[in-house]
Amino acid sequence: MSSQTEFPLVFESLKSILKPYAKKLTVKSDMSEVYYLDGAYSKKWQKDLFFASAQVKKNYVSFYLMPVYMYPDLLKYISPELKKHMQGKSCFNFKKIESPLFAELTQLTKQGFERFINEEYSRTR
């Protein structure tokens, strides 16, 4: 049985999935329990677009990935195991480090970022 004492390690693992995208996105929060990335201002949506976040919650660590909400076809081939961790349309919850699922989430994040860039939602630098 996992305990909340593992949450900081889970958070750091999920944060490490997002860190490579910080150079092309905007880091809105980088604290011990929240890491949050935004894209640039979208004329279509008339606001900065949320990209992704890792957050420590009371009972789990959440990984939010907005591209899977914006482009639901990205979820077409995720494993049943990763699907079990989904809550809602763009959130994955974890209580412990699950390396194979984190590797899959890394690939899903990469695919989502590529779509995000192609739709010109991110900052160009």
Image (tube, rainbow, N blue to C red):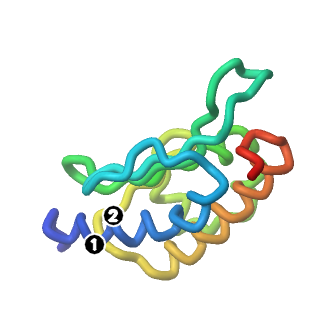
Q: Nearer the viewer, residue 14 or 85?
A: 14
Disc 1 target residue: 9
The residue that mark 2 highlights is 11
Task: State whether residue 34 is above or below residue 22.
Answer: above
Residue shown at 69% from the left, 65% from the top: 110
User: Residue 89, image x and y in percent?
Assistant: 57, 40
Q: Is residue 84 above or below residue 17?
A: above
Vertical comparison of 122 with 6: above or below: above
Q: Is residue 41 visible?
A: yes
* Residue occupying image coordinates x 24% and y 66%: 8
Disc 2: CA contacts within 10 A as few (<14), some (14-19) or many (>=20): many
Q: Is residue 16 left or right of residue 11?
A: right
Element type where label 1 sits in the image: helix
Report the side of 96 relative to 105 (left or right): left
Q: In this rendered view, identify the residue nearer to me: 8 or 24.
A: 24
Residue drawn at point x = 69 percent, y = 29 percent: 41
User: In this rendering, does residue 55 appear at all?
Assistant: no
In-front residue for pair 44/125: 125
